[in-house]
Structures are given as structure tokens and as C-alpha cells.
């Protein structure tokens, strides 16, 4: 369910680069700090601070592997404002320095693969909105993902008002999973958001949403777009897109924000957000 601890987990995800503490989280969801600590641990089998560090380091690993940002820049983007504290935390989690981790992953990622039939392009989208529900499962473990089974009953009235909306899933963990740093050491590890991507003329701000859903604003940004046929091709499309971006790193850098899969009329589209 979209309860207070799910809201807490999403807030931690969305504020990885901020120097905010447990009091800020407690204020955000209207709980006391002690309630947050206790109930978050009951829900996710980890403290909020340890969970935040886990997600920060996963994002750092993604940026080390997939971007040319230097280590100090990556540390700041992941909420570490002290280079040495970031390096120590990274070493503890991955038993490797950030520099050595980058060298090894770059070698692995540049190995040739036979990903054929995909075409990637760089595009720009204007401000849009999504309406999303969080599920704690990997996409391949969600039966009927992309269909109406997970939100048709909840969003039927909303879809009637937003006729041009499209089905979308957002995958906060897929890049970390691709470089094999998604440690499944907590009960709720993999996250998939499913819902609607609103047309540019639609606005859900004045529409009451079902309790499981939340609005997400998407600012204007560039992204790498790769079309594919079915969800079985998702990881092939992802590998192709990553290798395409690595070959163009002088101009195109992965931001670390969650990739999206959008259901078009005759195909699916993987979108990986890029740095502005």
C-alpha cells in the first residue's frame, strides 16, 4: 500500500543529493522521528539513514560506471560533501575504491555485445506530469505490467478525463541492476512505479487521485530514447542504449534519474534521462 513508509522511502529516493536528516523526513510525513525510525525499519528491515546511504552509493556506482564525471562531482551529486567520507563509504560497501570500481566497470561495459535491431536517438521533452503507484517488485516479476491490471480500476475515472495519457513504468533500480550493484539485502529492494504519462495539455493537479497514487512533475530535459517491441526486450534495449551513450560521452551523460518505459501505439520506448 501507499502508506506513510512508502512515502518516506520515496522521499529518501528523491532527496539523495540533499543534506536533510531524519527530522526533515519526519516533518514531511507528519510523524515523530522515533516513529519514523521504528516503522521504517519494520517495513524495510533497515534504518532510514542506512537505506539512504545504500541508495546514494548505488547512484554513485551508476555515475562512476556510466558517466565521465570526476569522483568529487559524483560525491556531491550523491549527497556527500566530503570526498574522503564518500570514498570510505564506497570502499565499505563495494570493497573497492571509486577509482578502481570505475576502471573495472568501464572495461566490462566496453566489451562487445550482439545487441541488434535497436535504434537510439537523443530527444527533448517539455514539462509533463506522471501519475504513479509504487510496487516493490522487479518488472519481470509483475504479471501484466504495462496493461491495465494494476491501475485500471483505480484510474478508470482519471483515464476518462485524461484520454491522451499513456501507460508508463518508471524503474529507479534498473541502472544499478545493470551494473550489478543492486544488493538484494532488504525485503523491499527492487522498485517499479506504474501509472500514466500525461499528454502535454493534461494536468492532474486539480484531480483527486486514488490513495495508492502520487503526482510526479517531469521538468524539461533531454533523454536517450530506444524503441523495442515487448518487455522481454527491455534489458537488450537498455544495454544497447548504455553502449550508445558511452560512445558519445563527450556530449551525452546519464543523469542517474530513473529510466522510464512508455507504451506507444505500436511499440515500447525506453527513456533514459540525461544531464542538462
Image (cartoon, grey):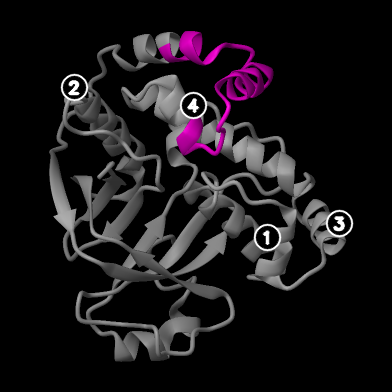
How far across and down, in percent of the image, does residue 24 sit?
A: 68, 60
- What residue is shown at x 61% (from left), y 52% (from top)? 12
Of the numbered discs 3 and 4, the one sitting upstream in the chain is: 3
- What residue is shown at x 41% (from left), y 87% (from top)? 156
Rendering quarter of residue 219? bottom left
Residue holding disc 3: 38
Label 4 element class: helix
Crowd class of label 3 (few under 14; some 14 to 19; many from 20; radius 10 Å): some
Asked whether the viewer can see residue 228, the reply is no
Cα distance in 3D space between marks 1 and 3 = 16 Å
Are the two marked residues, 1 and 3, in contact with CB atoms closer than 8 angstroms? no
Of the numbered discs 2 and 3, the one sitting upstream in the chain is: 3
Crowd class of label 4 (few under 14; some 14 to 19; many from 20; radius 10 Å): many
- What residue is shown at x 18% (from left), y 25% (from top)? 250
Tell me if residue 83 is in the magenta stretch: yes
How far across and down, in percent of the image, does residue 206 sit?
A: 40, 90
- The tag on residue 61 is 4
Cα distance in 3D space between marks 3 and 4 = 29 Å
Crowd class of label 1 (few under 14; some 14 to 19; many from 20; radius 10 Å): few
How far across and down, in percent of the image, does residue 203 sit?
A: 31, 82
Are the two marked residues, 3 and 4, in contact with CB atoms closer than 8 angstroms? no
Magenta stretch, residue numbers: 75-102
Rendering quarter of residue 276? top left
Left or right position of 181 against 274: right
Label 3 element class: helix
Cα distance in 3D space between marks 1 and 4 = 26 Å
Residue holding disc 2: 247
Rendering quarter of residue 43? bottom right
Q: Nearer the viewer, mark 2 or mark 1?
A: 1
Residue holding disc 1: 24
How far across and down, in percent of the image, does residue 148 sit?
A: 41, 73
Amino acid at each position: 500500500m501507499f502508506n506513510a513508509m512508502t512515502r518516506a522511502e520515496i522521499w529518501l529516493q528523491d532527496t539523495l543529493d540533499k543534506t536533510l536528516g531524519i527530522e526533515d523526513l519526519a516533518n514531511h510525513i507528519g510523524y515523530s522521528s522515533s516513529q519514523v525510525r521504528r516503522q521504517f525499519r519494520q517495513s524495510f528491515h533497515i534504518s532510514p539513514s542506512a537505506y539512504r546511504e545504500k541508495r546514494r552509493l548505488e547512484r554513485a556506482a551508476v555515475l562512476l560506471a556510466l558517466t565521465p564525471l570526476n569522483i568529487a562531482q559524483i560525491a556531491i551529486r550523491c549527497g556527500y560533501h566530503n570526498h574522503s567520507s564518500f570514498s570510505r563509504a564506497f570502499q565499505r560497501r563495494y570493497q573497492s575504491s571509486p577509482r578502481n570500481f570505475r576502471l573495472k566497470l568501464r572495461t566490462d561495459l566496453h566489451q562487445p555485445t550482439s545487441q541488434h535491431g535497436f535504434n537510439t536517438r537523443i530527444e527533448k521533452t517539455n514539462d509533463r506530469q506522471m501519475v504513479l503507484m509504487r510496487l516493490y517488485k522487479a518488472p519481470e516479476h509483475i504479471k501484466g505490467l504495462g496493461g491495465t491490471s494494476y491501475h485500471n480500476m483505480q484510474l478508470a475515472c482519471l483515464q476518462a478525463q485524461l484520454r491522451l495519457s499513456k501507460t508508463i513504468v518508471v524503474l529507479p533500480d534498473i541502472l544499478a541492476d545493470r551494473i550489478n550493484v543492486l544488493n538484494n539485502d532488504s525485503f523491499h529492494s527492487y522498485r517499479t512505479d506504474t501509472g500514466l504519462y500525461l499528454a502535454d495539455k493534461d494536468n492532474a493537479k486539480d484531480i483527486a487521485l486514488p490513495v495508492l497514487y502520487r503526482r510526479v512533475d517531469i521538468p524539461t530535459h533531454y533523454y536517450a530514447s530506444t524503441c523495442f517491441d515487448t518487455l522481454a526486450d527491455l534489458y537488450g534495449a537498455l544495454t544497447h542504449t548504455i553502449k550508445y551513450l558511452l560512445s558519445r560521452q563527450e556530449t551525452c551523460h546519464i543523469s542517474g534519474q530513473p529510466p522510464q518505459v512508455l507504451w506507444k501505439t505500436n511499440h515500447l520506448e525506453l527513456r533514459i534521462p540525461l544531464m542538462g
